Amino acid sequence: MDYNNLPKDKFVFAQREGKIADKKLDTKPVGYLRDAWRRFKKNKSSVAAAIIILILFLYAFIVPIASPYKVSDRDGYYKMVLPKSELFAWLGWDGCTEQSESQAGYDYYNSIGQEYGTSAVKEVRNAETDPLSGNRIYTLYVDSYEKVGFTYVDLTQEEYEALKEYQNNTGIQVVYPMPANYKTDFVAVTNGANLWYKLADETDKTAGETKNHDENGNPIYEADYLMKKNLTYGQYDSLRMDIPGDGEGGLHVVYAVKNQTGFHLRVLYKEYYNYLNGHYATHVFGTNQHGQDIFMCLAFGARLSFLLAICVSVLNLFIGVIYGSVEGYYGGATDLVMERIAEILGEVPFLVVATLFQMHLAKKVGPVPSLLFAFVMTGWIGIAGRVRMQFYRFKNQEYVLAARTLGASDKRLIFRHIFPNAIGTIITSTVLIIPNVVYSESMLTYLGIVNLETSGITSVGTMLSHGQTYMSTNPHILLFPALFISLLEIAFNLFGNGLRDAFNPSLRGAEE
Amino acid sequence: MLKYVIKRILLMFVTFFIIATMCFILVKMLPLPNAKAQGRDYNLVLERREKMGYNKPILTQYWIYWKNVFNFGGTSGKGWSPDFGLGEQMYISQNVFDVLKEKMPYTIVVNLYSIIIALPLGLLFGIYAALRKNQWQDHVVSTVVMLIVSVPSYVYAFLVQYFLCYKTGWFSLTVASRETASLFSWTMFKSMCPAVLSLSFGTIALLTRYTRAELSEVLTGDYLLLARTKGLTKNQAITRHAMRNAMVPILPMILGLIIDILAGSLIIEGIFGIPGIGKLYITAINLRDYNFFMVLTFFYTLVGLVASLVVDLSYGFIDPRIKMGAR
């Protein structure tokens, strides 16, 4: 082919539409925050920690609103009941506990439910006879809710009428009969309304008239027995039995006794609670010694801690950034004076600051705001120091000089050109303020330096100190707050590590 | 060097006096406890307060306070007998400083035991993890350390108290009282064990993490490679070169821990009923005994200041390459 004389029509334009020069890049540029996020996602443990933190936050903010219980709800009967969850009852999360009882104890717990059909004893785990004394010893699996049984209540005329109407409408029996002479007869009974009187009587045993307990130790309830004997105090088992009319069996039964203010009745507490609150008592984490629902109180305390911590972080961030920027940017004498002030403030032990704020301000503005002031008082110093360091690193770099030459103001230089360099460390340290505040707050309320109980609120620390008193008998009161705070601190620690690595661009590509 | 040390010490005292002054003024501005409290003679309390100078202007009181504190050869006639006031709500009419001196040994002993346990263990775990870096042993140690560092110390105290004291009954729930056992007796030691154990967890974990980080960084250094190439065995290189350099930042931290023995832990003392100064402080706050509160505040501030000063200065003494006071 003659390469010198190629015919013109052999040539074809390779590309005619559009320009190929100055073509935009297909990929988007990756900014600092996007890059950090991308690398954070790769860190599995940090992502898990972030999810745990999210769950804890949701728990703290949703439960106080959604829960049927309130912090001020102090139930006098469901005190220290055990954790019970309908969903997880098969896991042993059923509000029951094993306890060792004598025959009398067994009769008591076994008989509570006789009147309405369910027993407080869910299971007899073990029964043996003590070889020395001949007494029966039972290991029972007792429902801590059912064992409350019956109580006496005093109602006004209207309340009594309303209760009777509720009974008629729903068909649920709340009021149960009581012996008319309960006042004189039942003085000696500890849990007054639970009339469990056994048939056991020494005379009966020796005479062999009736056998009060069968071979399993269960009391034998005999309807006839009531009539056979001329019943008085201490001799009947349960009022559920068909009791002949007034006085015939020697037992006079009434439903309500009128007194000065209204009526005195014997109610099944379970149903009465349902009548009052519209739901049966199910405490997922149990209750404490004041009868407060731990699940809700913990969420309430956590919400208080979180809100406090977020406020502290924001305020500290605000003060710290401005203070640190001014220090770092101007340097010289300004820096020297401001740094000394921060140093002196930073050397005061936090406990002392918190105590002094409590002593001075708790009466005027309340314990929580004064705690907030105490946290802010010393908390910003750390952030200010970090910002200052960043300023010292960057303020003499060429790009700052260039911006200055172009006429940028101090404000613009500080916040547009130098400050963004510090954003990674600042975000990390601001986030890590949260677990610190939660921990310190729990410690201060635990020690009683900050007393929240008088203001009708609660905190994790208060719950810990409640739990510690009853640690040996009811460890669940302590378990859940301690578990919560441990989980929170671990999660934040992991999350903080991930965040720190993600915001450190020098680690980019260095991860294995 | 000496000049710098003196300068730092003087600066520390200036800081201390500023903080002390602020605290003094803030405490004096607080209302005094109710003189009409039950079981008190109202007039006697008022008269006593007048005698103690509580009705004078705060600055005058401040002057008197320091004059009493620097009371050389005062009433007792022997050396320095500082007078920080008398207990008013607790340890009534006892010299506050004497009570403090009496409580101090308990705090120190408990924390000393915990340091004695924690130091070797922490260093050992840390070195082990650093030498096995990125192997499974390191991962196990690091994970456990991460968990332990995060969990607050009181949670350990609860765990130890529940399982070792209550469930198994190995130890008593609280520390033996001073009436029944002397400080260094076996009974006392045994009853202190749970508290010591709960204190140690955190310290061990902290030390392990720090040692691991420092040593593993040193181990990547070029001079270690040089040491190996010139014929040292691995152990020789580690003990002679790596450990020495890793100790530069670790020793000051240990020093800081040792000084913190004095301050102790408020919450652990509360849980285990150790009659130390932490418990004294909490009681003073709850009962609003300002003299105790003030002296303990000064004490804690001073311990904190001394600790940070010693940590700062020790860098220069440990590592001659670090020039003190150089800009």
Image (cartoon, coloured by chain):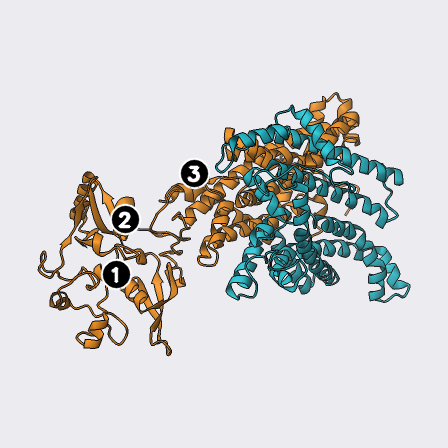
Chain colours: A orange, B cyan
User: Which residue is denoted by mark 2 in the rendering?
Assistant: A274
Callout 3–callout 2 Cβ contact below 8 Å: no
Query: In which chain is the residue bearing label 3?
Result: A
Instruction: Point out residue A74 in the picture as x, y percentages from the top left corner.
Output: 37, 45
In the image shown, does A175 or B240 lie closer to the viewer?
A: A175
- Which residue is drawn at the image coordinates 24% and 59% (left, top)? A195
Secondary element under disc 1, as helix, strand or loop, is helix
User: Which residue is denoted by mark 3 in the rendering?
Assistant: A456
**Residue B256 horizontal side relative to residue B280, left or right:** right
Instruction: For the C terminus of chain B, give its image quadrant.
Output: top right
User: Which residue is denoted by mark 1 in the rendering?
Assistant: A113
Q: Say few, some or many: other residues with alpha carbon within 10 Å of mark 2 (under 14 / 14 to 19 / 20 or more).
A: few
Instruction: Point out residue B302 in the picture as x, y percentages from the top left corner.
Output: 72, 40
Q: Do labels 2 and 1 share a chain?
A: yes
In the image, what residue type sits under mark 2?
Asn
Instruction: For the N terminus of chain B, give its image quadrant.
Output: top right
Q: Do labels 1 and 3 share a chain?
A: yes
Which of the 4 image quadrants contains residue A321? top right
- Which residue is drawn at the image coordinates 57% and 43% (left, top)? B283
Q: Which of marks 3 and 2 is nearer the N terminus?
A: 2
In the image, what residue type sits under mark 1?
Gly
Instruction: Point out residue B9 in the picture as x, y percentages from the top left corner.
Output: 81, 38
Q: Label 1 vs label 3: CA separation? A: 36 Å
Asked whether residue A13 is in view, the answer is no
